[in-house]
Amino acid sequence: MKDGLLVLFPGIRYSVDSPLLYYTRVAYSYAGYEVIAIDDYGVKSGDDLGAYADQAVKTLTKRLKDVSFEEYAHVVFAEKSVGTVIGPMLEDAMGLKNVFHIVYTPLEAIYSYLKPERRILGIAAGTTDKHIEIKALRAACKKLEIPLVEIKNGGHRLEAGKDVTKDISAVAQVIATIGDPKEITKLEKKLADKKAAEEKAAAEKKAAEEKVAAEKKAAEEKAAAEKKAAEKKATEKNNGSSKADIKNIRKLKQGTKTAEKQIEEMMEIWLQSNVKEQSFVPKKYWSKNYKEVLRVMGLASVYYYEEDGKILGFAGSMEEAMVAISVAEGQRDRGIGSLLLNKLQDEMGVLEVIVYSKNKKAQNFFSKNDFKAKDIQIEEATGEETIFLTW
């Protein structure tokens, strides 16, 4: 790869042999750069800067089409006056990458081409240049971090016009500040450091965002897991999928006000259970028998299953005869009924119960608990077949 290429873009009345461009060429030639000097733009002078620049770019695109810019390690455009507009326009038109610009006494139109991605080694302008307002240029350079060399009382040629030694000194100052090839190394380091800082900041931001996202996700997953566990626990409790604990079995203390309230709670379970599970029997039958069963429950030996202060099932008997055994809806298949029945079996020694033939669940339940069928009859009140079971 070749070391570098310098392309000189003159002004309309400022040739490539004038001080700024001439000494820039000398400096870069000493550094081993090849030089292309644009002697003219092949355009007639006119009042329309836009049209002039457009035509110049078309002409230069054809003229430079055989130049292999990508073969050079560095490509530098040194631009003066109208060249400060033509240079960046040509860069864009030819799709060149990473061109470095040295901008001498720009025109107002330069602002359209001052972009963060444009590599500008520096800008030089006179404080009394009529072609650009120095305060606005100063602000633009500060914003984009572009080195600006201001020549006090300098005009568009950076000359004050009263002291030639000062004018020569101004040119020397400009060349030394932004026209020296060493400035490329400085700018490259600056851009590399800036890119590294931006990448580091971006990486840190991404890491922070990922950390926040991960923490949020973890928190959400934890909350979801806790919610799921709570819902599972509640579902198990409500649907009867958790195993019943014998420690929750209580014996009813008859004759107390508390017992009366507890029996009423049990009777609600009894009524709802019979209406739903034995729907083949008219609902009014259960409502009609409610008071009688309530009365007998007040005299019977009753065990109930309680969780969190709520009765979930009960079983009662008058001597050997079962009065009732019911488990609340959603609490079945937990073993509550078996625990209650076992308590009565331990207490009574002998138990008898009558179930409907259509109630297969009840038959299976008692069969699993060692009850045997002894007789079959027709219940007069309902006309339904019943089975007499004993244990």
Image: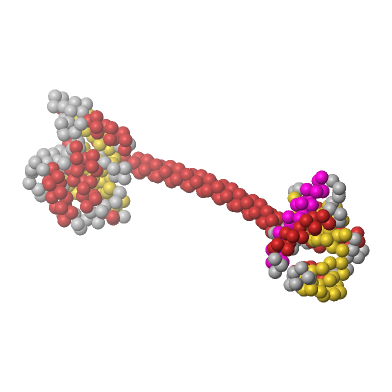
Residue 128: which quarter of the image? top left
Residues in magenta? Answer: 257-279
| Principal secondary structure, stretch drawn in magenta | helix
Tell me the residue at 29%/35% (across/down).
141
Residue located at (81% from left, 61% from top): 324
Instruction: Please name the residue shown 84% across and 67% down the image.
Output: 353
Position of residue 44 in the picture relative to residue 292 (left or right) = left
Closer to us: 189 or 378: 378
Image quadrant where one finds the C terminus = bottom right
Q: Position of residue 314 (x, y in %)?
A: 80, 57
Q: Quadrant of the N terminus?
A: bottom left
The one of 161 and 126 positioned closer to us in this rendering? 126
* Residue 252 in view (yes/no): yes
- Looking at the picture, tell me which residue is in the foreground, 259 or 74: 259
- The residue positioned 68% from the left and 54% from the top of the image is 234
- In the rendered image, residue 276 lying in the magenta stretch gets the answer yes
Outermost residue, top side: 162
Q: State the image coordinates of residue 65 (x, y, percent, origin top left).
A: 19, 57
Q: Is residue 388 above or below residue 86?
A: below
